[in-house]
Image (cartoon, helix red, strand yellow):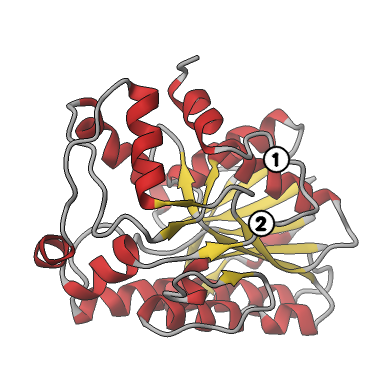
């Protein structure tokens, strides 16, 4: 397939492009700087709604990974605006272009996040669960709503709600590893909050699955079958690294360091999310996934 990808330079985009190429797909990237332009790299500026319509010539599928990182920096008013606008503007730009051209792509795969559900405590969430509260939920709702014109136009649309993506090359795990390797691995707050995660190899596999299963559309929870508490995650990572757990980091300290809203949403929120039953996971269990990622047997 010929696949157009927006937001290709990050941790997930880099892994996804490598995997899709290994499966025989041809990749065209959308880039924001003209020095990166080339035969397989075309210009766009979603903040201005600008995109080269020629980017869609012969394209079978479009994958949207674009959006400013929610992990970097404090959540100031300006930062939160960038987080929201970068996602909604990118999606609206892509969807508007796809709906205007004569030969639209066969499938549009959009990213979202399990932040859609908000902090749900012990509640098990599936794709039919209503939206939660808080900034991340509001972002996800606006993000997903921006996809609706594509589906209305008859383009098969798949929305992945990502959990915590585990990989050695990026994401939260890359941030945690130096601390855990030094024996400073810690539970966050009470440690009872649920963490829904997915190994990067399974996430890239899910994209391939969505591309090739033409009967499928709608929202998919991109999380592994084994949801764990933060305490279980901490002990599992310590065990794989052969390091003891250190101490717990109290909620008040996390809120002081990261700001209350960011700490509550990213570190202390509980998301017990049910995974997609149609996909055969390579790494459904946390210990096996961590051993694979860290190459420890």
For the N terminus, give its image quadrant. Answer: top right
Which residue is at the front of the view, 50 or 262? Answer: 262
**Position of residue 244 in the picture relative to residue 207 (left or right):** left
The 10 Å Cα crowd at callout 2, few under 14, some 14 to 19, many 20 or more, is: many
- Position of residue 121 measured from the top left corner of the image (x, y, whole percent): 44, 72
Q: In this rendering, does residue 130 appear at all?
A: yes
Marks 2 and 1 close (CB-CB < 8 Å):
yes
Q: Is residue 83 above or below residue 230?
A: below
Q: Quadrant of residue 276?
A: bottom right
The 10 Å Cα crowd at callout 1, few under 14, some 14 to 19, many 20 or more, is: many
Which of disc 1 and disc 2 is earlier in sequence? 2
Residue 135 shows which numbered tag? none
Q: Could you tell me which secondary element the residue under label 1 belongs to?
A: loop
Q: Residue furthest top?
A: 297
Which residue is at the front of the view, 103 or 203? Answer: 203
**Position of residue 80 in the picture relative to residue 226 (left or right):** left
Q: Residue at x 69, y 49 (%)?
A: 207
Q: Which residue is mark 2?
A: 275
- Position of residue 126 measured from the top left corner of the image (x, y, whole percent): 65, 70
Q: Is residue 189 above or below residue 289?
A: below
Q: Which residue is mark 1?
A: 281
Which residue is at the front of the view, 116 or 93? Answer: 116
- Position of residue 210 measured from the top left corner of the image (x, y, whole percent): 77, 54
Q: Residue at x 12, y 66 (%)?
A: 252
**Position of residue 212 in the picture relative to residue 183 (left or right):** right
């Amino acid at each position: 397939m010929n696949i157009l990808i927006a937001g290709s330079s990050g941790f997930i985009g880099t892994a996804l492009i490598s995997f899709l190429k290994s499966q025989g797909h041809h990749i065209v990237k959308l880039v924001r700087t003209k020095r990166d332009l080339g035969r397989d790299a075309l210009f766009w500026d979603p903040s201005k709604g600008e995109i080269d319509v020629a980017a869609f010539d012969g394209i079978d599928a479009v994958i949207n990974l674009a959006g400013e990182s929610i992990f970097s920096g404090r959540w100031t008013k300006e930062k939160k605006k960038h987080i929201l606008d970068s996602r909604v503007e990118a999606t609206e730009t892509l969807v508007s272009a796809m709906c205007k051209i004569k030969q639209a792509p066969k499938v549009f795969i959009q990213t979202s996040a399990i932040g859609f559900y908000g902090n749900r405590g012990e509640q098990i969430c599936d794709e039919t669960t209503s939206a939660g509260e808080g900034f991340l939920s509001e972002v996800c709702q606006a993000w997903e709503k921006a996809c609706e014109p594509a589906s209305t136009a008859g383009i098969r649309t798949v929305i992945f709600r990502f959990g915590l993506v585990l990989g050695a090359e990026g994401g939260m795990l890359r941030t945690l590893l130096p601390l855990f390797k030094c024996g400073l691995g810690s539970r966050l707050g009470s440690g009872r909050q649920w963490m829904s995660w997915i190994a990067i190899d399974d996430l890239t596999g899910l994209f391939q699955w969505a591309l090739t299963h033409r009967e499928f559309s709608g929202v998919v929870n991109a999380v592994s079958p084994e949801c764990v508490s933060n305490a279980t995650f901490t002990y599992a990572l310590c065990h794989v690294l052969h390091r003891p757990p250190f101490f717990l980091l109290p909620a008040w300290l996390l809120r002081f360091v990261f700001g209350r809203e960011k700490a509550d949403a990213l570190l202390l929120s509980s998301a017990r999310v049910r995974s997609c039953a149609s996909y055969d996971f390579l790494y459904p269990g946390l210990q096996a996934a961590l051993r694979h990622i860290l190459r420890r047997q």
